[in-house]
Amino acid sequence: MAKISTRTSANTTTNASAKIEFGELTNHTGYHIRRSYSTFMRMFATNGKQFQLKSQQSSILILARENPGITPAAIADAIEIERSLMAKLLTDLMKRSFIETKACTIDGRQKGLYITAKGKTFLRQVLEYFSQNLEIELNRNLSQREQLTLIKLLQKIYENR
């Protein structure tokens, strides 16, 4: 059984059996991004359980709503996931009648994605729940100004490719 750890300072974590020093890890941006991502994913899993939704699926629904007719490949590229994973995520969303595909009017070989009325209702419920729960929990130690600064800093990192 894993020990539950608690943060005592920026450089150490303690649990029932040991005090762990993190050394120069605490000076690495990537280390903090990974820890933050892990925290987010745990919170998303807890908060999203009732919706049976993976974090990438909420992104797919939002992009399909905002960009009617967008291709699966374009979404996969935009949210940086493998196309094989995209296919699995889409299959689930289509089985649940949240997304539908239609042939592209310009190139009939391509399929465009469209969020359904059921998908829009579901997404509205998810986003409302997450804004009232997940986002509050995730940002509870940040002021509104710090939240905006964090978003801008993270954007700078992932746009630096």
Image (spheres, rainbow, N blue to C red):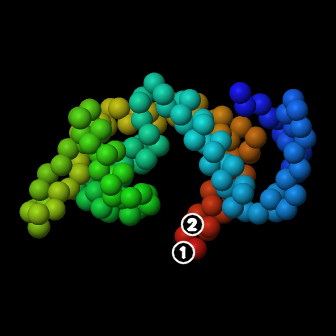
Q: Name the residue carrying label 1.
A: 161
Who's the residue at 31% across and 46% down the image? 88
Q: Which mark is residue 53?
A: none
Question: Disc 1 marks which amino acid?
Answer: Arg
- Say which element carries label 1: loop
Q: Please state the horizontal and vertical placement of residue 52, each as a whole percent of the image.
A: 41, 30
Locate the C terminus by quadrant: bottom right
Residue 32 image position (x, y, % from top left): 72, 55
Quadrant occupied by the N terminus: top right
Q: Is residue 51 at least partly visible in the picture?
A: yes
| Amino acid residing under circle 2 | Tyr
Q: Residue furthest bottom?
A: 161
Mark pair 1, 2: CA separation: 7 Å
Other-residue count near label 1 (Cα within 10 Å), few / some / many at <14 / 14–19 / ≥20? few
Left or right position of 115 against 160: left
How many callouts does the rendering have? 2
Residue at image position (38%, 63%) is 77
Identified at 47% across, 43% down, the residue is 55
The percent coordinates of residue 4 (x first, y second) are 77, 31
Residue visible at 45% across and 24% down in the picture:
50
Mark 1 and mark 2 in contact? Answer it, CB < 8 Å. yes
Q: Nearer the viewer, residue 145 or 68?
A: 68
Q: Position of residue 6 (x, y in %)?
A: 82, 35
Please give the residue where the numbered disc 2 appears in the rendered image: 158
